[in-house]
Image (cartoon, rainbow, N blue to C red):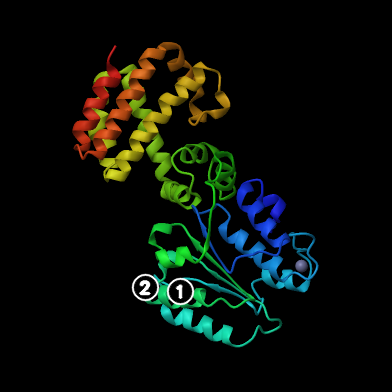
């Protein structure tokens, strides 16, 4: 379990705000932590719970070793409640049960702490029930709501909470987390350029999707540079059947863009930033062959293709025209 000092490396603004409020004894009654998955929202909520209960905290930093800290760490603290989805949603009964808990005094102290995970999944009834709770704050209770989709949270709940926006994961940290999940570095680097949401990144890595997608891109690039006439066959037989849905087409185009960005990085000697790390020889070769002007044109062509996809141009037409432009002089 990390402490505030460690969390500060990725979420400096959040940590500063919270630890300041702790030290000045000015914590709000309700917080809404919003931001992508993997940004440390739940971690911060549990740290705040420890800080709230710890008997021996130093400044805002909980000791991590007292009974209170240890029971929060193991999920066994009687006055710390975590509400999670029951099936697809958080139901009104769960909020009612929580209220019942609160109507009793804190089991061991006057203090109560509750965390609502995936708060956007509360049913309307649950959200309204919680709202009443937030409107009549008990001096000793602290609520932390966590969400990845703040636009799905009732405005009235937002207005009664202090909203803290967690920053997206920096790419290097995302890569580290992905490799900790057993993802090969070459794939971790690739998806880290496509999203900064850990969960989404893991999804892209599922069932080798990213490995296959990357291979399709490399194959198309090979065709374009060595046997241009085959590029259209590859497009028909390999690319289009693989990148089918609109979101997939989009990701395919993004992967192509990453290739040309890599070539530019090669030209300017920023090799530590390269995504296709297993293709350095080929990138080097392209970096020598392609002029900066041509690379600029290619990136422009890819941007245009993305725009046309947004405007609902058929993927096949759009990709064929993109290939023609990539092949030009
Ligand atoms: Zn402690």
- Residue drawn at x 55%, y 22% is 270
**Quadrant into which the C terminus falls:** top left
Residue 55 marker = none
Mark nearer the N terminus (1 vs 2): 2
Which one is in front, 263 or 92?
A: 92
**Secondary element at image label 2:** helix
Which one is in front, 165 or 5?
A: 165
133 versus 198 height, above or below:
below
Residue 131 marker = 1
Quadrant in which ligand 1 is drawn: bottom right
Residue 290 seen in the figure: no
Query: What residue would you read off at disc 2?
Result: 124
Which one is in front, 235 or 145?
A: 145
327 versus 68 height, above or below:
above
Which one is in front, 235 or 25?
A: 25
Q: Where is residue 61 in the image (x, y as percent from the top left)?
A: 75, 59
- Residue drawn at x 44%, y 74% is 86
Left or right position of 13 against 203? right
10 Å crowding of disc 1: few (<14), some (14-19), many (20+): some
Q: Position of residue 22 (x, y in %)?
A: 70, 62
Instruction: Identify the image quadrant of residue 313.
Output: top left
Instruction: Identify the image quadrant of residue 115.
Output: bottom right
Residue 17 seen in the figure: yes
- Residue drawn at x 19%, y 38% is 314
């Amino acid at each position: 379990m990390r402490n505030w000092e460690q969390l500060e490396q990725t979420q400096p603004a959040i940590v500063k705000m919270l630890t300041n409020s702790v030290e000045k004894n000015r914590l709000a009654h309700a917080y809404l932590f919003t931001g992508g998955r993997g940004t440390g929202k739940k971690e911060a909520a549990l740290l705040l719970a420890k800080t709230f209960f710890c008997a021996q905290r130093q400044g805002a930093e909980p000791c991590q070793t007292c009974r209170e800290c240890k029971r929060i760490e193991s999920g066994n603290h009687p006055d710390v409640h975590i509400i999670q989805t029951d099936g697809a949603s958080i139901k009104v009964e769960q909020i009612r049960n929580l209220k019942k808990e609160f109507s009793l005094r804190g089991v061991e102290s006057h203090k109560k702490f509750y965390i609502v995970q995936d708060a956007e999944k509360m049913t309307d009834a649950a959200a309204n029930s919680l709202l009443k709770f937030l409107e009549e704050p008990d001096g000793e209770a602290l609520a932390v709501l966590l969400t990845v989709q703040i636009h799905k949270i009732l405005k009235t709940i937002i207005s009664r909470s202090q909203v803290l926006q967690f920053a997206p994961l920096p790419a290097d940290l995302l890569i580290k987390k992905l490799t900790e999940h057993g993802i090969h570095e070459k794939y971790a680097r690739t998806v880290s350029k496509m999203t900064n949401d850990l969960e989404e990144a893991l999804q892209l890595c599922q069932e080798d999707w990213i490995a296959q997608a990357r291979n399709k891109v490399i194959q198309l690039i090979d065709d374009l540079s060595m046997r241009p006439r085959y590029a259209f066959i590859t497009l028909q037989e390999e690319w289009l059947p693989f990148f089918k849905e609109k979101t997939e087409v989009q990701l395919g185009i993004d992967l192509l863009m990453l290739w040309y960005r890599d070539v530019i990085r090669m030209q300017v000697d920023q090799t530590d930033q390269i995504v296709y790390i297993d293709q350095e020889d080929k990138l080097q070769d392209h970096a020598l062959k392609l002029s900066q002007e041509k690379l600029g044109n290619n990136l422009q062509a890819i941007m245009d293709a993305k725009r046309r996809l947004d405007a609902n141009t058929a993927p096949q037409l759009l990709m064929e025209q993109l290939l023609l432009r990539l092949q030009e002089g």
